[in-house]
Image: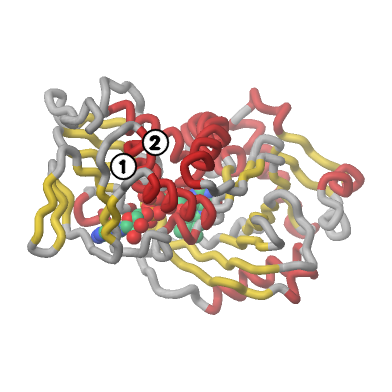
């Protein structure tokens, strides 16, 4: 979120300095760990209706944002919107039926984007799944992007546009017009706090929700769109990236531990993966990551503004799905009043004092 805001503010002519306790590549961020699924339909089944409505708007905004980013960075970020496929093994078929019923109840007007597929239709869409699965649900609007490429493109664009970057610097607190780093105070017109779970001590009610993923290279597998496997205990998804790389995730544990992935989670993810496609048996595990999603109690994002201070946080499971909408809300607060449930003005008289460019 911080990188997106920095890039867009630079484009608008502002002078921007970034502080990150991590490297510019964001190796330790939730953003790097994520599968970057853009899945409003799958998420609304066990989530909030807002995530669906805002998520569909954000999905429509990604292509234009990525075009701009390519112009600024020279990097063409992988993005696809071929829909996603939801499947279940025969003993778990009731989980898929339950998912379909919940979806039909929750978003009754969007039946045209939700298709139940028989085996021959699945064979046409994803031939390598049809060997093991006789039915599926196709959510035709869903997509995914490559977050490694997005982070690299944002870094390149920020540097090209003159953003200053203090890497591996831990920020102690962010206040109105001030960033505190150790004993030093960096003063600015507007301080933006986009530290995700790292801002927990300054944001009441923010919690971390642990998630674990595997990144694998599987040249024997040819899946062209995200796949979600229904299971009574968890939902596993497989998000394809370029060059036979797949992200497999994700656990969701109400814990704020940032410890490496557990053997149990790793075994569960890998065995579920193998059960979807035996070609994953020979896959190489590239990374096993764990991190915390930053969530408020309502699991919805929030932009808080007061004079000289903007906090954007609470993106929870939906950092990629929702960030274009959060970004737009945050940017709009800098030039006028914004009425959006995401935005909270802490003190009516207090807008960030930053209307013009540098
Ligand atoms: C396993 C997993 C899978 C996910 N899958 C998806 C998905 O498929 N689709 C989707 O939309 N979302 C997904 N998400 C959610 C998404 O990753 C998050 O919502 C998003 O990354 C939150 O963005 P953020 O910028 O608020 O926080 P982060 O991405 O964590 O970024 C915070 C930044 O602040 C820096 N920072 C933190 N504390 C400090 C400090 N004290 N000083 C300086 N810098 C600091 C960090 O180094 C980092 O660079 C997933 C998350 C996880 C963990």
Residue that numbered label 1 is attached to = 312
Q: Residue 289 versus residue 207: which sits nearer the camera?
A: 289
Q: Is residue 27 left or right of residue 281?
A: left
Position of residue 82 relative to residue 18, above or below, is above
For the C terminus, which image quadrant? top left
Displayed-image quarter of ligand 1 = bottom left
Position of residue 86 relative to residue 128, above or below, is above
Q: CA distance from mark 1 to mark 2?
A: 8 Å
**Cβ–Cβ under 8 Å for marks 1 and 2:** yes
Q: Residue 153 versus residue 218: which sits nearer the camera?
A: 153
Q: Residue 246 versus residue 113: which sits nearer the camera?
A: 246
- Could you tell me which residue is drawn at 54 percent across and 54 percent down? 149
Position of residue 77 relative to residue 20, above or below, is above
Residue 129: mark in rendering: none
As helix, strand or loop, the secondary structure at mark 2 comes to helix
As helix, strand or loop, the secondary structure at mark 1 comes to strand
Q: Quadrant of residue 237?
A: bottom right
Image spot of residue 167 (x, y percent): 30, 62
- The reply to whether the residue tagged 1 has its Cβ within 8 angstroms of ligand 1 is yes
Image spot of residue 53 (x, y percent): 51, 29
- Marks 1 and 2, the one that precedes in the sequence: 1
Image spot of residue 215 (x, y percent): 59, 66
Residue that numbered label 2 is attached to = 326
- The reply to whether the residue tagged 2 has its Cβ within 8 angstroms of ligand 1 is no
- Could you tell me which residue is drawn at 75 percent across and 75 percent down? 281
Q: Does residue 52 appear anywhere in the picture?
A: no
- Could you tell me which residue is drawn at 76 percent across and 67 percent down? 219
Residue furthest toward the left?
Answer: 183
Mark 2, other Cα within 10 Å: few <14 / some 14–19 / many ≥20:
many
């Amino acid at each position: 979120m911080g990188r997106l805001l920095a890039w867009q503010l630079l484009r608008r002519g502002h002078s921007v300095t970034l502080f990150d306790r991590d490297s510019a590549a964001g190796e330790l961020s939730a953003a790097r760990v994520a599968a970057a699924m853009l899945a409003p339909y799958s998420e609304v089944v066990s989530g909030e209706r807002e995530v669906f409505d805002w998520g569909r708007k954000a999905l429509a905004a990604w292509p234009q944002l990525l075009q701009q980013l390519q112009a600024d960075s020279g990097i063409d970020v992988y993005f696809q919107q071929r829909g996603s496929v939801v499947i279940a093994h025969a003993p778990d078929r009731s989980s898929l039926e339950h998912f379909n019923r919940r979806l039909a109840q929750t978003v009754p007007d969007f039946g045209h984007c939700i298709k139940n597929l028989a085996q021959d239709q699945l064979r046409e869409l994803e031939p390598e799944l049809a060997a093991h699965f006789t039915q599926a649900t196709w959510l035709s609007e869903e997509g995914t992007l490559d977050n490694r490429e997005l982070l690299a493109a944002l870094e390149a664009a920020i540097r090209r546009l003159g953003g200053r970057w203090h890497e591996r610097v831990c920020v102690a607190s962010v206040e109105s017009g001030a960033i505190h780093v150790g004993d030093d105070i960096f003063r600015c017109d507007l301080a933006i706090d986009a530290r995700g779970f790292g801002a927990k001590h300054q944001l009441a009610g923010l919690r971390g929700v642990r998630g674990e993923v595997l990144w694998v290279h599987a040249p024997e597998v040819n899946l062209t769109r995200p796949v979600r496997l229904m299971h009574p205990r968890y939902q596993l998804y497989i998000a394809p990236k370029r060059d036979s790389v797949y992200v497999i995730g994700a656990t969701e544990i109400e814990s704020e531990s940032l410890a490496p992935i557990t053997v149990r989670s790793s075994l569960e993810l890998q065995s579920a993966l193998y059960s979807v496609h035996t070609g994953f048996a020979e896959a190489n595990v590239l990374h096993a990551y764990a991190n915390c999603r930053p969530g408020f109690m309502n699991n919805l994002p929030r932009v808080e503004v007061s004079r000289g201070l903007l906090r954007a946080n609470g993106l929870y499971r939906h950092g990629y799905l929702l960030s274009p909408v959060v970004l737009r809300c945050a940017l709009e607060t800098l030039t006028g009043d914004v009425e959006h449930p995401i935005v909270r003005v802490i003190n009516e008289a207090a807008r960030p004092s930053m209307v013009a460019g540098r």
